[in-house]
């Protein structure tokens, strides 16, 4: 079974709001449908919820609901690493990187892991 490291950053939720939430839901549903073959390790940026609250984002409650649904479903793992080093260790236990651009994507590239960036438009 392949392990995918799925990184989401706060910026799309702040700048694209509902579109970013819809993309997150679509992605998680796709991974759920493939969970017999692919194990998802979702690593949201550690400050996402806090920054959504600080910026009075209209998607804060829906984001929280998605996190709760995901953690309760049991078909993937929510990585709560709060340091770069610990997130990197989780990443290196995976087979590929998917999600928003980040320094971790470059770490994956340097480790010769496949990297694919998500696009809210698609």
Image (tube, grey):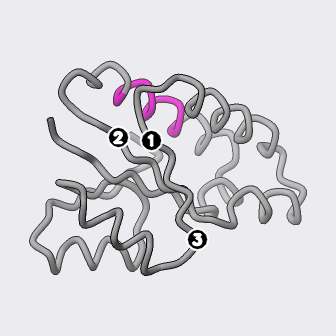
Q: Crowding near pointer 3: few (<14 within 10 Å), some, many (20+)?
A: few
**Whole-number angstrom distance, CA of label 3 to CA of label 1:** 15 Å
> Which label was assigned to residue 82?
3
> Which label was assigned to residue 40?
2
Where does the image place residue 62, in percent across and percent down from the top left? 75, 35
Q: Nearer the viewer, residue 104 or 71?
A: 71
In the rendered image, residue 15 lying in the magenta stretch gets the answer: no
Instruction: Please report contact status of discs 1 and 2: CB closer than 8 Å, yes or no.
Output: yes
User: Dot 3 lies on which element?
Assistant: loop
Up-down relation of residue 89 to residue 57 (above or below): below
Instruction: Please report contact status of discs 3 and 1: CB closer than 8 Å, yes or no.
Output: no
Residue position for label 1: 77
Part of the protein shown in magenta: 23-31
Where does the image place residue 86, in percent across and percent down from the top left? 44, 73
**Whole-number angstrom distance, CA of label 2 to CA of label 3:** 18 Å
Where does the image place residue 10, in percent across and percent down from the top left? 63, 62
Q: Quadrant of the N terminus?
A: top left
Up-down relation of residue 65 to residue 40 (above or below): above
Q: Is residue 91 left or right of residue 81?
A: left
Up-down relation of residue 27 to residue 43 (above or below): above
User: Dot 1 lies on which element?
Assistant: strand
Q: Residue at x 42, y 73 (%)?
A: 102
Q: Name which quarter of the figure residue 93 lies in.
A: bottom left
Q: Nearer the viewer, residue 17 or 2?
A: 2
């Amino acid at each position: 079974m392949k392990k995918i490291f799925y990184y989401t950053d706060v910026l799309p939720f702040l700048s694209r709001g509902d579109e970013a939430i819809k993309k997150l839901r679509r992605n998680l549903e796709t991974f759920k449908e493939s969970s017999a073959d692919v194990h998802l390790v979702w690593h949201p940026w550690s400050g996402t919820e806090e920054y959504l609250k600080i910026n009075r984002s209209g998607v804060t409650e829906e984001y929280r609901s998605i996190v709760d649904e995901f953690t309760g479903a049991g078909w993937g793992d929510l990585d709560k690493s709060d340091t770069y080093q610990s997130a990197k260790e989780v990443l290196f236990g995976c087979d590929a990187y998917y999600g928003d651009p980040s320094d971790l994507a470059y770490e994956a590239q340097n480790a010769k892991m496949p990297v694919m960036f998500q696009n809210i438009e698609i």
